[in-house]
Image (cartoon, helix red, strand yellow):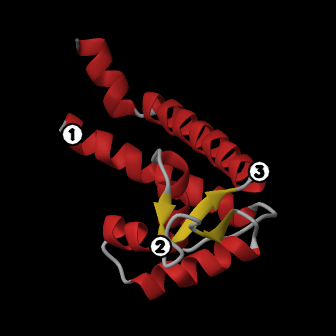
Amino acid sequence: MAQASSTDQLVGTLRDTIVSMVRRDGPDLSARQLGVFLTCYLQEGAHTVRGLAADLNVSKPAITRALDRLGELDLARRKVDPMDRRSILVQRTLKGAAYLRELRSIMTEAASTGRKAEERTPERAGRRAAG
């Protein structure tokens, strides 16, 4: 039961985060674009189109389309790898780092709101009183 509650809480936090991101005045990313963005910003090391395609198990053209959008928004940029001119490196940007900070803030608020709502539910209050 606790596992289902924990999962429901995570899904609620995801929903609240996405709703907040959609409502605010800023970039609206698809799930794929967000996956590429988060992979680039949360996993250390150099990222390439080929590597992202392998990590996310999608085609290179799908990664390219996601990077096109991230580039339009200045959340990431592509650069030819000087060591291997056939390879394209994906670089972070200052605007992308700011977007990640904002996303973290929104998620923290969503998680906090979800925990407070869960604490107010009668079922949890009854279990706490009985325990």
**Residue at which label 2 appears:** 49
Q: Amino acid at mark 1?
A: Gln
Image spot of residue 69 (x, y percent)? 66, 78
Question: Is 72 drawn above or below residue 111 in the view shown?
Answer: below
- Residue 59 left/right relative to 78: left
- For the residue labelled by badge 3, is the local secondary structure a helix, a strand or a loop? helix
Question: Is 80 drawn above or below residue 128 in the view shown?
Answer: below
Which comes before the other along the chain, label 2 or label 3? 2
Residue that lies at the very extreme toward the bottom in this rendered image? 61
- Residue 38 left/right relative to 52: right
Give the Cα distance between marks 3 and 1.
Answer: 38 Å
**Residue at which label 3 appears:** 94
Which comes before the other along the chain, label 3 or label 1? 1
- Residue 16 left/right relative to 106: left
**Residue at which label 1 appears:** 3
Task: Look at the numbered discs 2 and 3 and tell me whether their residues touch, using CB distance below 8 Å.
Answer: no
Residue at 77 percent across and 60 percent down: it is 24
Disc 3 residue crowd, few under 14, some 14–19, many 20+, Cα 10 Å: few
Residue at 35 percent across and 68 percent down: it is 56
